[in-house]
Image: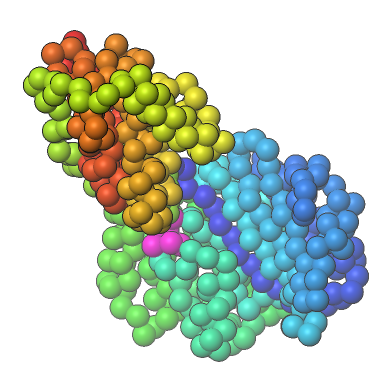
C-alpha cells in the first residue's frame, strides 16, 4: 500500500513540427534526473526497450490529427508509470507529462529529491507551464484533484487567478504569479522560492515529499497557502490538512480469521487515500455464522444419483471453463481457489453487474456445484443429491451442508459475497469435520 509521488505538468511547445528538437531538453532532464526510477520500457502499440530512437518512432506511429503520445515504464521496483502526450494544432500546442513513481519513500533521500527538482526546473524553463505540481498521490486524492490536469482544469476555468493547493513542488506560471503578486509570491515562506527566466516561480515547500503528512510539514503547508491566499484562515487550512494526515495514518489489519485471506486483498482495490479507512471498516466486519447446514441428511429423492452427480460435475466444469483464464487456481479446486473466486466476483461486482436471470439460472448453481465439489474432494464429503437443487447436501462428519443454498445467498449482491463468502463456509465445514 505504498504511496506514490505524482507529478502533473503541462507546458507550451515552441516547435511542434520537430519532435526531436523540441523534446531534447525534456529527455536530457529526464535522463539526468530520474536516478533509481529511470524508465527502461517505452510503449506505444507494443513495449520496447528504452531509447530515444524508440520514443521518436512511437510518437510518429501514434500521431493522430491533434495529438500523439508515448508511455514510459519500469519492469521492476521502484515502479514508474509515466506518459508523455503532445497536443498539436489546431489545438494549442503543448507537452503534457504524467509521472507516477512508487514508492513515495524513495523521495525521503535528499539527493533523489534534488535531482527531481532539477529535472522539473529544466522542464519549466523550456516548456512554460501555467501550473505544475508534484506531491503525494494519496494526499492529492484527499485534496480533490487525483487526476491528470485537474489543477490546470480548475485554474484554466477560473483564469489562473488562485492558488488552490500548495504541494511539495509547485511551478506557478507567470500569469498566476502576477495575479498573486510577484513580490508576495517570492516572499512565500518555503524551503525554496526561485524565479525562473520566463517569469514562472518554482516553489519547494519542504525538503522531502515523503514526510508531507508530518505536523511540521502541515504547518509549513498552511503558512505558505495562507501567505499566497490572504483570504484564507490559517487555523481552518491547518485543521483541514491535519484531518487529511489523520486519514492516512496506517491502520493495522485485524480481520476476521476465516476471512483474512479474502479481506486482506480488498483495500488495494480502493484509491490510496481510502485504504486505511477501508482497513478500519473491514477490521470490525463480522459476517453472520453459516446457517446452510442440517443436523441430519434429508434422504436422496432422485432416480439416478449417478446422473445427477454428473450434472453437478458439468456445472462445476462450466464455471472453471468460463473463469480459468482469469483464475487459473480454479482448476486446482483448493480452499485458496475459493478465496480467488470470492475476490474476483467481488472485484467485478458480478451480482450487480449481470442480470438476475443469468445469475439465478447459471452462475449460482455453478458456484454451488464447485463449492460442493471442493467439500467432497478436500474434506472427504459425500454428496446427497435432491431434486430441489438447494436441498442437495454434502455430508461431512456429523453434519450435512447445503452448498447450493449458500451459493444462492452468496450471489444476491456485492455485499453478500462477503457476508456469505465461500472462504468462510469452507473453514466452518472444516472445523466441524474436526
On screen, residue 390 above or below 166: above
Q: Nearer the viewer, residue 270 or 142?
A: 270
158 relative to 10, above or below: below
Decide if residue 2 is on the left or right side of residue 9.
Answer: left
Q: Quadrant of residue 271?
A: bottom left
| Nearer the observer, 374 or 203 | 374
- Rendering colour mode: rainbow
The residue shown at (69%, 68%) is: 96
| Residue drawn where x is 23% and y is 43% of the image | 409
Res. 25 in view:
no
Nearer-the-camera pick, 334 or 91: 334
Say whether residue 303 is magenta: no
Q: Position of residue 219 (x, y in %)?
A: 36, 62
Q: Provide the residue span drawn in magenta.
A: 138-142
Q: Residue furthest left?
A: 295
Q: Residue furthest front?
A: 303
Q: Quadrant of the N terminus?
A: top left
> Can residue 269 be seen?
yes
Q: Vertically, is 217 above or below 293?
A: below
Task: Tell me residue 228's x, y (percent).
Answer: 46, 78
List x then y, in percent, for residue 356: 34, 55
Q: Position of residue 277 (x, y in %)?
A: 29, 50
Q: Is residue 4 left or right of residue 273?
A: right
Amino acid at each position: 500500500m505504498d504511496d506514490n509521488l505524482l507529478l502533473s505538468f503541462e507546458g507550451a511547445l515552441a516547435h511542434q513540427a520537430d519532435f526531436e528538437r523540441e523534446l531534447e531538453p525534456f529527455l536530457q532532464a529526464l535522463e539526468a534526473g530520474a536516478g533509481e526510477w529511470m524508465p527502461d520500457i517505452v510503449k506505444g502499440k507494443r513495449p520496447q526497450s528504452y531509447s530515444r530512437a524508440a520514443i521518436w518512432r512511437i510518437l510518429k506511429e501514434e500521431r493522430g490529427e491533434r495529438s500523439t503520445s508515448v508511455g514510459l515504464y519500469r519492469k521492476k521496483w521502484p515502479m514508474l508509470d509515466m506518459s508523455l502526450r503532445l497536443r498539436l494544432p489546431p489545438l494549442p500546442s503543448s507537452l503534457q507529462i504524467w509521472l507516477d513513481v512508487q514508492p513515495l519513500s524513495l523521495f525521503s533521500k535528499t539527493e533523489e529529491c534534488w535531482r527531481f527538482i532539477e529535472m522539473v526546473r529544466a522542464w519549466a524553463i523550456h516548456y512554460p507551464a501555467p501550473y505544475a505540481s508534484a506531491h503525494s498521490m494519496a494526499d492529492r486524492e484527499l485534496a480533490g484533484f487525483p487526476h491528470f490536469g485537474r489543477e490546470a482544469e480548475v485554474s484554466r476555468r477560473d483564469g489562473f487567478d488562485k492558488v488552490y493547493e500548495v504541494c511539495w513542488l509547485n511551478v506557478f506560471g507567470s500569469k498566476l504569479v502576477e495575479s498573486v503578486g510577484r513580490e508576495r509570491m517570492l516572499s512565500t515562506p518555503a524551503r525554496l522560492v526561485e524565479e525562473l527566466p520566463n517569469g514562472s516561480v518554482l516553489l519547494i515547500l519542504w525538503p522531502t515529499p515523503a514526510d508531507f503528512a508530518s505536523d511540521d510539514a502541515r504547518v509549513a503547508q498552511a503558512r505558505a497557502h495562507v501567505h499566497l491566499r490572504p483570504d484564507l484562515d490559517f487555523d481552518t487550512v491547518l485543521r483541514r490538512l491535519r484531518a487529511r494526515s489523520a486519514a492516512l495514518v496506517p491502520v493495522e489489519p485485524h480481520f476476521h480469521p476465516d476471512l483474512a485471506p479474502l479481506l486482506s486483498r480488498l483495500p488495494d482495490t480502493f484509491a490510496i487515500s481510502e485504504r486505511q479507512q477501508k482497513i478500519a471498516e473491514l477490521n470490525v466486519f463480522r459476517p453472520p455464522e453459516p446457517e446452510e447446514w442440517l443436523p441430519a441428511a434429508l434422504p436422496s429423492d432422485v432416480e439416478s444419483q449417478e446422473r445427477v452427480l454428473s450434472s453437478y460435475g458439468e456445472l462445476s466444469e462450466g464455471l472453471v471453463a468460463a473463469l480459468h483464464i482469469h483464475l487459473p487456481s480454479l482448476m486446482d479446486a483448493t480452499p485458496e481457489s475459493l478465496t480467488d473466486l470470492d475476490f474476483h466476483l467481488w472485484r467485478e461486482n458480478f451480482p450487480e453487474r449481470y442480470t438476475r436471470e443469468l445469475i439465478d439460472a447459471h452462475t449460482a448453481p455453478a458456484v454451488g456445484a464447485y463449492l460442493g465439489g471442493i467439500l467432497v474432494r478436500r474434506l472427504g464429503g459425500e454428496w446427497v443429491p435432491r431434486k430441489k437443487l438447494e436441498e442437495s447436501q454434502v455430508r461431512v462428519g456429523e453434519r450435512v451442508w447445503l452448498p447450493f443454498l449458500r451459493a444462492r445467498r452468496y450471489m444476491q449482491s456485492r455485499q453478500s459475497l462477503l457476508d456469505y463468502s465461500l472462504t468462510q463456509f469452507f473453514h466452518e465445514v472444516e472445523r466441524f469435520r474436526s
